[in-house]
Image (cartoon, grey):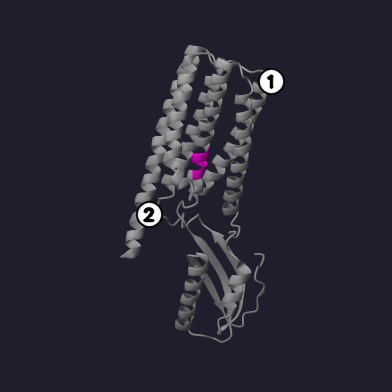
Amino acid sequence: MSDHHTHNHSHSHNDLKGRNLFISILLNILITVAQVIGGILSGSLALLSDALHNFSDVISLVVSFLANKLAKKQASLHRTFGYKRAEILAAFINASTLIIVAVLLIIEAVKRFRNPEEIESNLVIWLSLLGIIANGLSVLLLKKDSEANMNMKSAYLHLLTDMMASVAVLIGGLLMKYYQVYWVDSVLTFIIGLYLIWMGFDLLKNSTKLLMLFTPDTIPIKKIVEEINGFETIKNVHHVHVWQLNEAEIHLEAHIDFNKDITLSEFDVILHEIEHLVFHKYDINHVNIQPEFGKDDAKDVIVQD
């Protein structure tokens, strides 16, 4: 009964994430179209450049949205894990593009610092405000889920990029127009670019770790092996693998050499105790143990396959 409730709660939460992403896509399409029209009417290259940035956000959001949908698909004979890693792959792609966008922002900031351009019309100001409001709403929609999901975080950071860049352009433009201060926009954009490279690299590093099946940073393999070795009937724990399928599932695989030739029912009892130990202490929720007795194989904790 409890598991069924949790499953339903998780399913409805995923639907909410998908809905929030879809709303963000629509908002960004609105901004992009408005900026293209505004750029053509005002002759503003800056607005057309912002429209291109927003269009890249639309693509990133679509990637995140599709990954969110794919992750819900059922496993099959040909895809025994389903598409559970789709969101990790989306986070990797979006983190990579985020770093590229951040580098382009820095290059643009340096160009503007050397050759400042005064804001061209009131239309540009109003469209910048529209971009800030729409992106700000999207950021608020995705913020909560971005704290616990790499895919949502990658989408969130793309939107945050555009919102902060729009704020920088607007502040800089207004200061140019009314106070003849020309450097603020460039400096703010440069700082934003550095911040995004730092955030993007962190996301890229974490998504790469998951894709490469690295041991999660929170899992102390040596300590876990020591604790399992402490079981009276266990002689040796070896050939250990700990990895994440996605952000919700941590898997432990190991070979266990027993002191005596135990029965299958005895093994089931020990397996249940191991599962209880690693789940409650280390959040490992999938355990696959290969029992052995007197088998002649490598007994190292980590064995190169």
Above or below for 242 versus 60: below
Residue 241 covered by magenta stretch: no
- Separation of residues labelled 2 and 1 (CA atoms): 51 Å
- To which quarter of the image does residue 196 belong? top right
The range drawn in magenta is 153-157
Q: Is residue 28 visible?
A: no
Measuring 46% from the left and 21% from the top, which residue is drawn there?
127
Which residue is nearer to you in this view: 187 or 163? 187
In the image, residue 109 lies at what x, y percent? 64, 26
Position of 269 with respect to 172 (left or right) is left
Q: Quadrant of the C terminus?
A: bottom right
**Residue shown at the point (50%, 44%) measured from the top left:** 153
Q: Residues within 10 Å of mark 1 (few under 14, many from 20)?
A: few
Against 269, residue 148 (above or below) is: above
- Give the residue type that dot 1 points to: Arg
The three-letter amino acid code for the residue at tag 2 is Ser
Label drawn at residue 10: 2
Judged from the image, the secondary structure of the residue bearing numbered disc 1 is helix
| Magenta portion: prevailing SS class | helix
Name the element at disc 2.
Answer: helix
Residue at the image position 60 percent from the left and 30 percent from the top: 188
For the N terminus, the quadrant is bottom left
Q: Residue 154, position in %: x, y? A: 52, 42
Residue 52 percent location from the top left of the image: 53, 25
